[in-house]
Image (tube, rainbow, N blue to C red):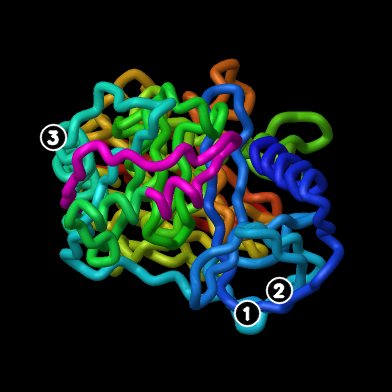
Amino acid sequence: MRVKIFIAALAALLIAASGASAASSQITLRGTFVVAHADGRAGVKDANFYLLKTSTGYLDLHLSATPKLKPNQRVVVTGAQQGRDLFVTRIAATAPAPAAVPTTPAQTLNTLVMLVSWPSAPPDFVTPAAAETQVGSTDDDWYQEVSYGRLGMSATATPWLTIADPGGGCPIGEIWTGAEAAAAASGYNPAAYDREMFYVPWTAGICPGIAGLAFVGGRISWIVGEMDTRVTVHELGHNLGLWHSHSLHCTDASVPVPFSPTCDPFDEYGDLFDAMGHGFYGVGHFNAGQKNLLGWLAGEVRDVTPRLRGPVRATLTPLEGAGGLKALAIHADGTTFWVEYRTATGVDAWLSNFPGALSGVLVHIPQPSDTSNGTNLLDMTPNSVNGFSDAALPVGSSYTDPSRSFTLTVRSASASGSSLVVRRPVGK
């Protein structure tokens, strides 16, 4: 949140300098609560930007605490407006959070990539052709594979557009409105595209430590000096409605275990094998829990309930290939354990460097405190010195959940699939 705090402090200084008071002239507005998530580079904490979408545009919301609201939820807001800033004294939902909208089969999202510069931040090495290739070819191939042909990307890139200097901090709204106006003046209609992506050069010196930002469940993203698959696929994933793929370190009486009521705060980007996680070793498939949120596993998930009348036997086919059973969703004591099998093929070929992720099955759970806030990778070999790099439950091993609702055993693993058994724990 450091970027947002900096912006709020800067806005407050500007207001004080002008003699305005954030406590005066309170107004009440209705609109849609919008979240722009900012992804930090190595060592920089990520942040959320909160905005209010009204019939006349967007306002930056300055909040004293993180609201318990979901992206795209309808709200009523009271606060003091100063230009495009709204200093909030009260915000409340007026309707339930919208349901996730799965991707329509064979959908192609057309993206307008706007290359944006200003006098103090001239264009860099990214060309319109390179931007179109990244989003419309490389990212398209990635999404076509990962979604099993359900989602593709196409792209049109503008020439470099010159806008007025948007100011310091992280002026995403100024870049957004300036770029749309410049694109319209050049003959483009941004509103006609499914997605809008703004690229600004590394030399711009804005959004310090941030590689990219995106509206969660929206159509807008910002790329800051890193037009590459690791960043663009990730930001487009946020647009689809995904949060991060975390990892979770848990203990039982100070002994490391895969999962327990006693867990550390999740590692924000801790899932090494998922594009919504770490992403530095390779841009891996979204995990099964994330794919399910997007409607990409229709008919390819088997639900297993805790009241097992007999052993449940299943063979998971590799997550990377189309067809077959892709995941078990084991529901136990209010938690869903997503079980998947990965192989080093396609965009996951780089997983050959992590044999401990391929030796059995990976297990994820939704974030326990907020199931909409992404997924957590569990370490099924918690006593290993290798951390989450060998997180798979290996062949021949078993795992019993904390509530002793089920025991999962991995019988075999090969290029074609992994054989599993789910049964009642011994003695229950």
Relative vertical location of residue 210 with respect to residue 87 in this rendering, above or below? above
> Where in the figure is residue 6, as x and y percent of width and height?
70, 37
Q: Earlier in the sequence, mark 3 or mark 1?
A: 1
Q: Amino acid at mark 3?
A: Ala
Residue that appears at 42% across and 54% down:
177
Depth check: give the residue in front, 111 or 150: 111
**Rendering quarter of residue 250:** top right
Give the left or right position of residue 329, taking residue 150 as reference: right
- As drawn, which residue projects farthest toward the front? 18
Mark 1 touching mark 2, by CB under 8 A? yes
- Under tag 2, what secondary structure? strand
Q: Earlier in the sequence, mark 1 or mark 2?
A: 1
**Rendering quarter of residue 42:** top right
Which residue is labeled 1 in the image? 30
Residue that appears at 72% across and 75% down:
92
Is 170 one of the magenta-colored residues? Answer: yes
Relative vertical location of residue 244 with respect to residue 119 in this rendering, above or below? below
Give the left or right position of residue 145, taking residue 397 as reference: left
How far, Cα to Cα, is label 3 from label 1? 41 Å
What label does residue 129 carry, if any? 3
- Under tag 1, what secondary structure? strand
Q: Amino acid at mark 2?
A: Val
Which residue is labeled 2 in the image? 77
Classify the position of the N terminus by image quarter: top right
How far, Cα to Cα, is label 3 from label 2? 43 Å
Mark 3 touching mark 2, by CB under 8 A? no
Is 110 one of the magenta-colored residues? Answer: no
Which residues make up the magenta segment? 153-178
Depth check: give the residue in front, 148 or 123: 123
- Mark 1 crowdedness (10 Å alpha carbons): few <14, some 14-19, many ≥20: some
Relative vertical location of residue 11 with respect to residue 229 in this rendering, above or below? below
Mark 3 touching mark 1, by CB under 8 A? no
